[in-house]
Image (spheres, rainbow, N blue to C red):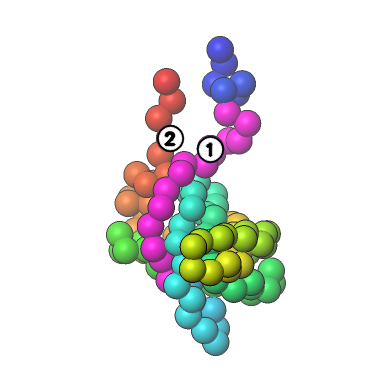
Amino acid sequence: MAEEQRFKRLYPRRQFSTPCQVSYFDRLITGKIVDVSYNGVSILLPQAVELTEVATVQLPERIRLRVRPVYNQPVFTRTLLEESARYRVGYKIQLIEQGQRPWTKLCHVVHW
């Protein structure tokens, strides 16, 4: 089977879960990364963001990304104690400001 047929995307997403900090001009939001690829990242945030705001994402692995949001999807979670709304925000990576090599290793998807 050809590689083009195995993956629909040029850079496939890799499921990944780690906390992160998303900083905008006027605020800092703690979120959780859901998946990564060379070109983008999905983050679960406690609040919606404007799709025009450029942000910086800081990961614990000393990786800092300059990103631009491209979509905002509400995600409703229900636990025993509460029902809350969170937002899955997809970001396109504009620039890898710090940690180029760790980011590349993090996004690598093994092709079988």
For residue 12, which numbered disc appears in the image? 1
- Give the percent coordinates (x, y) of residue 94: 55, 61
**Label at residue 83:** none
The residue shown at (58%, 67%) is: 83
> Disc count in the image?
2
Taking the view exactly as shown, the residue that stands out farthest to the bottom is 26
Kind of residue at disc 2: Val
Is residue 15 a member of the stretch shown in magenta? Answer: yes
Q: Quadrant of the N terminus?
A: top right
The C terminus: image quadrant = top left
* Labelled pair 2, 1 in contact (Cβ < 8 Å): yes
**For residue 56, side relative to residue 103 (left or right):** right
Residue found at x 68% / y 73%: 50
- Is 39 rendered above or below residue 47? above
* Magenta-tinted stretch: 7-21
Secondary structure under tag 2 reads loop
Farthest front residue in view:
80
Name the disc covering residue 109, or none. Answer: 2
Depth order, front residue of 87/69:
87
| Of the pair 86 and 58, the residue shown nearer to us | 86
Give percent across and percent down for residue 63: 36, 61
Which circle's residue, 2 or 1, is located before the other in the chain?
Answer: 1
The reply to whether residue 94 is visible in this rendering is no
